[in-house]
Image (cartoon, rainbow, N blue to C red):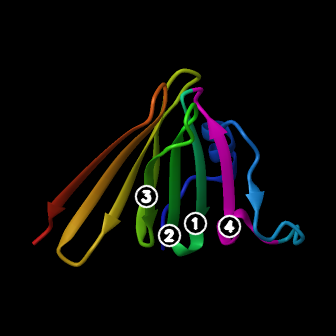
Amino acid sequence: MAIFPEENDFLSLFECEPTLLDSTSKDLPFYYNKATYRFSNGEEDFIVTLSPSYGELKIQVTQRASNRLLSLLELKRIHKFEITSDKKDHSSVLLTVVNEDSQQMIEIEFKPYFKQIFKEHFTR
């Protein structure tokens, strides 16, 4: 089972309301839905789509001035999604993907500017 923050934590982190895939069912818990957040830090625009129950995440980052794609990260097996900073001027997350013989850690900063650091560690 993937470990993701609660819905309110994402509202605070991304500072926007998500578009939900199934917005008609009030009884469907956030964890089992697909949520898309669109926000900006002033320099870059972000589209973050997550499906916590499947452990899936997609982050698309474009440069605001030119609309040029800077990064596209699409993960299908996130083990853990941690919010490492959620402040007005600094926000970041740490994603953990566990494979058979390795563990991948992806650090992403959304504010003040986009930054992505990818590290892989062998577990065997």
Q: Which mark is residue 7?
A: none
Q: Give the mark, 3 or 2, whose residue is nearer the N terminus.
A: 2
Q: Which mark is residue 55?
A: 2
Is the residue under label 2 in contact with that under label 4 (CB below 8 Å)? no
| Residue at disc 2, secondary structure | loop
Which residue is labeled 1 in the image? 52
Give the magenta part as a residue range: 28-42
**In the depicted view, which residue is nearer to us: 2 or 23?**
23
Which residue is labeled 4 in the image? 34
Quarter of the view holding residue 45 = top right
* Kind of residue at disc 4: Lys
Horizontal arrangement in the rendering, residue 93 relative to residue 49 (left or right): left
Horizontal and vertical percent for residue 16? 73, 40
Front label number (3 vs 4):
3
Q: Give the mark, 4 or 1, whose residue is nearer the N terminus.
A: 4
Q: Residue furthest bottom?
A: 100
* Kind of residue at disc 2: Gly
Horizontal and vertical percent for residue 5? 56, 53
* Kind of residue at disc 1: Pro
Front label number (1 vs 3):
3
Which residue is labeled 3 in the image? 73
